[in-house]
Image (cartoon, rainbow, N blue to C red):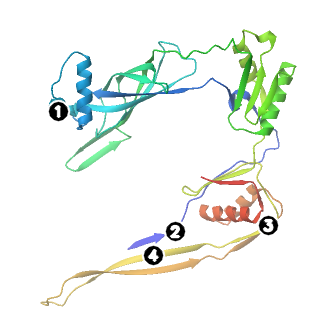
Amino acid sequence: MKKIAFSAVLILILVLPNHEVNADRIKDIASIEGVRENQLVGYGLVVGLNGSGDKGRATMQSMANMLARMGLTVNNPRDIKPKDTATVMVTATLPPFPRAGNRVDALVSAMADAKDIQGGTLIMTPLQGPDGKVYGIAQGPVSIGGFAAGTGGTNIQKNHPTVGRIPNGVIIEREIPMSLNSLTEVKIILHNPDFTVASNMMREINRALKSGYAAALDPSTIALKVPESYKGRIVELIRFVENINVAIDMPAKVIINERTGTVVIGENVRISPVAIAHGGLTVEITTEYQVSQPSPFSTGKTVVVPSRKVTAKEEKAHLIQVSGASLGEVVRALNAMGVTSRDLIAILQALKASGALRAELEII
């Protein structure tokens, strides 16, 4: 018997109201303009695989090119058997203020039809930045944290065997020049632009420095002029500013992910007086297979006949009257009634359409 039922699982994350003012350090909600990571990428070869490598011509040609750079000429790349080699894309993140000789991790991803890169070694691979310049060299044994094996049509796999890491596998060869002490102005960039938070940050910085050095340019940018006492000591100035606490005013917002049934409700979400009634409809499709046998010694055939039955059930709607309560209280009342996540999402959308939900409703 086969049953199809429409249901959902409720996952609710509710941020409860807190009458205390939330304050975070500037370093937790903002960053310094220009102090950022950069992405590196390169094309390379992983060798030493146990027959799980590529079979394409691109791998053959890449191996021929590598051998040619080492002084070994290959007349016909098709003579190369690349089953123990895989072409890979190597990526890495260049941290702020890198220094030549420092090391960072490399991420290695198979590009062609390699089954896995377990036990392989990445051959020296130049990593380029967006400007085309080489900033690092990657090489080393690949660790995938899993495996893949199979025989006779049976396979077993743990994790993702075609992607691995090389801890500290990238040596930085080129530095990104940046002089902090020559700056006359430092710009602080908010991670989440907000007029109120930007204004609060400007006020707290000026209060801490006892002067009007900071100015809010827009909801995401605060320009800080370097005081004379901090000229040539920008690092110390940034350390001082980063540890200043700023009051955070979060917007009223409800986030819905209908695919997973997740609902996230902010602490400032409120609801106008309203009455809520919602009834659930459940549809069940049942399929039973019956065998029809022919009479003995007849020319008939045994056949399987499906028998389908469709039933629909609508639950009685409950009425809730709410008078200017927070949305958290409404959700708790709905949960007590046993509503599913899809019911809750439908109710939230209806509240927004009616104008009773005083918050932004975002569906992801």
**Residue 135 as seen in the image, left or right of residue 186:** left
Q: How crowded is mark 2: few (under 14 residues within 10 Å), some or many (20 or more)?
A: few
User: Which residue appears at 78% of the width and 28% of the height?
Assistant: 245
Secondary structure beneath disc 1? helix
> Which residue is tagged 3?
274
Q: Tell me which residue sits at (72%, 27%) in the image.
A: 188
The reply, left or right, for residue 77 in relation to residue 2 is left
Give the image quarter of residue 201.
top right
Give the residue type that dot 1 points to: Arg
Which residue does the numbered mark 1 point to in the structure image? 78
Q: What residue type is labelled 3?
A: Val
Marks 3, 1: nearer the viewer: 1
Question: What SS does tag 2 mark?
Answer: loop
Residue 190 place in picture, x, y as percent: 70, 33
Q: Is residue 145 something one can see in this rendering?
A: no
Q: Distance between the residues labelled 4 and 2?
A: 10 Å
N-terminal-most mark, 1 or 4: 1
Question: Which comes before the other along the chain, label 2 or label 1?
Answer: 2
Closest to the camera, between mark 1 and mark 4, is 1
Residue type indicated by callout 4: Ile
Q: Residue 6 carries which label?
A: 2
Mark 3 and mark 1 residues within 8 Å of each other at the beta carbon? no
Residue on which the image places disc 4: 285
Report the label total: 4
Mark 3 secondary-structure assignment = strand
Q: Distance between the residues labelled 2 and 1?
A: 55 Å
